[in-house]
Amino acid sequence: MKRPTAKPAAAPKPYTDPLAEILRPGQSIELLKELHILTRDGKLNQDSRRKLKQVHHLCNFIAPLLNEVLGRQETLTLADHGAGKSYLGFILYDLFLKDRPGAHIYGIETRDELVAKSRELAARLGFERMSFLNTTVAESTQSERLPERIDIVTALHACNTATDDAIQFALAKQARHIVLVPCCQAEVAAVLRKHKNESFGKTPLSEIWRHPIHTREFGSHLTNVLRCLQLEAHGYQLTVTELVGWEHSMKNELIVASRTGTPRGNARERLQQILQELNLTELEGRFLG
């Protein structure tokens, strides 16, 4: 009886570093540990993998804006409003700006402990062209610690009217590019709710926000529509898209605005008409001022 021939042993699979799939070339491992994206022994868990993927995805939108500015001039200023732990600022600096001596990032945040930690981390990593200001978005427009011109303004999940304050800051600083991920818009919904009974007699469109959950959702959506018209009226060209999949976040609308200097012809008129039609004229100062 013939004995079966033994199969040759399978060749061992080459080792692949799991971090190589997600880290960018030259990315600082030490920075990612300090931001708690990597564990102290350099490992990446599922939650931090998702967080890093989100930040990298956002960087894919911002990197061309950095290149556009630095293609025009030797210097670049970026202000990140509602910076929090400054994940975005640190990673942008590490990946794109640490070797560009004319580039400077300003993180704007109101929480003392986060500002202090960001300053300490930047000093420890030698990120000399990063500054952190303890001030509100609204107050930052008048701050002498910021330059007169800012090239790029970012505001990620700046809650409620802080996003609008960031837009006003960008307009005042003549920003070339603005990147917004709005969050928790409540002001427009509150005004819709305040004038609901009056609106019932004015327009059948009031059925859109008759129920409280619709008031909240419609108010949030309408806020971003008004912001887009506002930016277009000031000479910005817009891209409005989804930042990440819905499985990651329900607050993921991304607005990227680039200044052309040519306002959209009817943007201001459309904005005013919407405010009047929906009984929101008390917000003209915010969106038309």
Image (cartoon, helix red, strand yellow):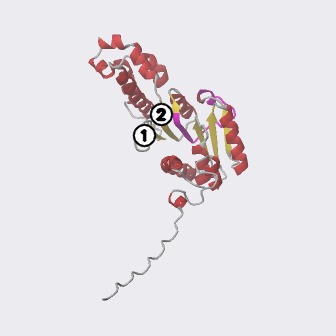
Assign the N terminus to one quadrant of the image.
Answer: bottom left
Q: Is residue 64 above or below residue 86?
A: below
**Residue 236 lies within the magenta run:** no
Which residue is at 67% across, 52% downward?
101
Q: How many labels sit on residues?
A: 2
Indicate the position of residue 46 as horizontal and vertical percent values: 50, 50
Please report whichever mark, 2 or 1, sits nearer to the chain's N-terminal start: 2
Specify the label residue 177 is tagged with.
Answer: none
Q: Secondary structure at mark 1?
A: strand
Cα–Cα gap, marks 2 and 1:
15 Å
* Quadrant housing residue 100: bottom right
Mark 1 residue type: Leu
Comparing 116 with 47, the one in front is 47
Magenta-highlighted residues = 138-157
Residue 280 visible, this orientation? no
Which residue is at 53% across, 48% downward?
48
Q: Is residue 79 above or below residue 168?
A: below
Mark 2 residue type: Pro
**Furthest residue toward left:** 204
> Is 249 on the left-hand or right-hand side of 4?
right
Q: List the residue tagged with mark 1.
A: 238
> Is 188 on the left-hand or right-hand side of 123?
left
Comparing 36 with 159, the one in front is 36
Which residue is at 58% across, 35% downward?
81
* Quadrant housing residue 228: top left
Residue 102 visible, this orientation? yes
Q: Secondary structure at mark 2?
A: strand
Indicate the position of residue 226 as horizontal and vertical percent values: 41, 28
Q: List the residue tagged with mark 2.
A: 182
Which residue is at 39% across, 18% downward?
192
